Amino acid sequence: MNLQNEYLLGIYNKVAKKDSTEPEFLQAVGEVLESLEPIVERNPEMEKTGVIERMVEPERTIMFRVSWVDDNGNVQVNRGYRVQFNSAIGPYKGGCRFHPSVNLSVIKFLGFEQTFKNSLTGLPMGGGKGGSDFDPKGKSDNEIMRFCQSFMTELSKHIGADTDVPAGDIGVGAREIGYMFGQYKRLKNEFTGVLTGKGLTYGGSLARKEATGYGLCYFTNEMLKANNNSFEGKTVVISGSGNVAIYACEKAYELGAKVVAMSDSNGYIYDKDGIDLDLMKTIKEVERKRISEYAVRKPGAVYTEGCKGIWTIKCDIALPCATQNELDKDGAEALVKNGCILVAEGANMPSTPEAVNTFLSNGVLFGPAKAANAGGVATSGLEMSQNSMRYSWTFEEVDEKLKGIMKNIFAAAYNASKECGCEGNLVVGANVAGFLKVYDAMKWQGVAY
Ligand code: NDP
Ligand code: 2IT
């Protein structure tokens, strides 16, 4: 962290003191405050509104017990979270994550970033995030259902189609959303668009499943186009093998690239002939098995234990799509050494601050998460619109809108970077462009809530 502006440094120091046990949250706040330096210096009146001080404190933090009965009849207890971060520009909106690493720091960093990401989409959505330290791995379908029902029994008291609209994230896909939606409907006797990422037979949007990965590639394509380049003939490495990674892989192929590596939390596979996406989907989406299984079934593919080694594979484009801080300085240096020209983040905050600096100082084109992975929540916004209209658009209609939104986000971030005097630095550009709309809304809505 390298904050010079006294006012912003003061805000950071207060947060660092108050939330000293929340490293991920501090990391996310530090990055945004750094980006705001040029505009705060140009607009000293910003200080008087106290908007930035308010932005770093969530409007509401809900923590709750989730108890459920496992298949052996034993009672299990997990902790549930919903952080309603900012509702200045619309109802709280953001996913729920089920993973043993979930804690308040992780949910707060995600909710904080979501506020600016949602602003960038141009749609009227505030920021929120939720989840639980529940580990879905190895659980039976019935256990997943009972957990989701218990989680929603409490969550339902705090959400609503015009209040807070959760969705998926790590460990929460169509199956979990279905169980949670069913429980919400039972409790409230209401069929509303209270969750997004729903199944297509009960209010889901076409192209939502594909949206984050496709959007990431549309955004990457804009970055490449601005540099007179394209996906055609490029070698791509993608970390993760979940929802975002799989559909990023699909779109990268469609745009003419070859994807040679993917991973999970145990290890990575390298397939020099290009990943067989149908096989990957079968193993990951249908059978829910480990990625090592891919190397067992695909001749020529190699599996390596441990996930960080994936960044040592030579590629033109790297798309980290697994989790926060998965790409550190060593990984970034390996990518630079091997001639990587572009890194775009499908996951939230996958690159450590040192990795980001390594990319920026070595001329690697860098697409930060808030902008590059906003296609998922943007399409959730489109699902909300369709639910409100009681109407559905075709796959092509949603996909076209998604493309347009990613194009606009790139333009907004690029232009903001130019105005801040660091043309092409999309970290600064995305933070500033996302911030300005929320700033204005908070300023005009006054101080007391
Ligand atoms: P999934 O649960 O579908 O997939 C997650 C993938 O990341 C899996 O391959 C998983 O491996 C791997 N992973 C998870 N945690 C770790 C870890 N601690 N170390 C190494 N690998 C890990 O989630 P998504 O694809 O939906 O989400 C991936 C990322 O994208 C997250 O950062 C999420 O916040 C972000 N994102 C998701 C959006 C969405 O619409 N779903 C939208 C925008 C961002 P394993 O199976 O071994 O756990
Ligand atoms: O991080 C994210 O943007 C998501 N997990 C998607 C949120 C959403 O509401 O679709």
Image (spheres, rainbow, N blue to C red):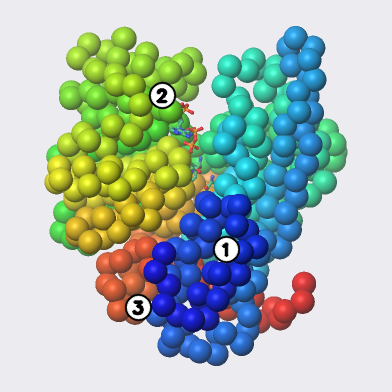
The spot of residue 116 in percent (x, y) is 52, 63
Q: Is residue 263 visible?
A: no
The spot of residue 9 in percent (x, y) is 50, 75
First in sequence: mark 2 vs mark 3: 2
Which of 12 and 371 lies nearest the eye of the viewer?
A: 12
Name the residue: 57% across, 58% down.
112
Name the residue: 58% across, 17% down.
138
Q: Which three-letter amino acid code belongs to the residue tagged 1?
A: Ala
Q: Nearer the viewer, mark 2 or mark 3?
A: 2
Task: Say whether residue 64 is left or right of residue 200.
Answer: right
Q: Which SS class for mark 3?
A: loop
Say if disc 2 is inside 8 Å of ligand 1: yes
First in sequence: mark 1 vs mark 3: 1
Are the residues tagged 1 and 3 within 8 Å (C-beta)? no
Task: Identify the residue position indicated by label 3 in the image.
Answer: 420
Numbered circle sitting on residue 16 = 1
Task: Identify the residue position indicated by label 2 in the image.
Answer: 266
Say if disc 3 is inside 8 Å of ligand 2: no
